[in-house]
Image: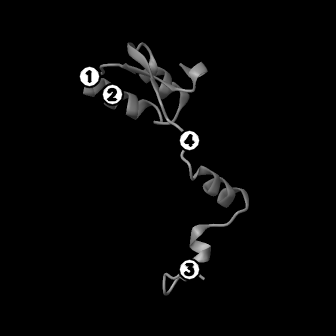
Amino acid sequence: MASVGLKTLTLAYKQIPIDDFQNLLNQYHIESDEFRESIQSPLVYLGTFGLDDPVREDVGKSIELIKYGCMIADSVGKKSGIKN
């Protein structure tokens, strides 16, 4: 899928009783590796699919704004909302 330009997404899930989940939240910080490991394994695999996400025609303009540090708000009058 990725070889033909599709974004590849995989879905999986894990059923956890609410009490067990609360215990994990009390035991580990939600962004810790230990919490992530306990949540992510074992998972039930649902499937993998490809998402067609073509580049938009106006992406070049957005890249230029990022590249040169110009923000849209810089060119708009803060009080009037009119472009300078």
N-terminal of the two: label 3 or label 1?
A: 1
Q: Amino acid at mark 2?
A: Phe
In-front residue for pair 60/42: 60
Q: Amino acid at mark 4?
A: Val
Q: Give the labeled residue for mark 1.
A: 17
The local crowd at label 2, few if under 14, some if 14 to 19, many if 20 or more residues have their Cα within 10 Å, is some
N-terminal of the two: label 4 or label 1?
A: 1
N-terminal of the two: label 4 or label 3?
A: 4
Identify the residue at horizontal 56%, vertical 49% (top origin): 57
Identify the residue at horizontal 68%, vertical 57% (top origin): 64
Question: In the drawing, what numbered circle is on residue 83?
Answer: 3
Q: Give the labeled residue for mark 4.
A: 55
Furthest-front residue in this view: 57
Q: Give the labeled residue for mark 2.
A: 21
Q: Amino acid at mark 1?
A: Pro
Q: Which of the two marks, 2 or 4, is nearer to us in this view?
A: 4
Q: Quadrant of residue 23?
A: top left
Q: Position of residue 38 (x, y in %)?
A: 45, 21
Query: Tag 4's secondary structure?
Result: loop
Identify the residue at horizontal 70%, vertical 63% (top origin): 69
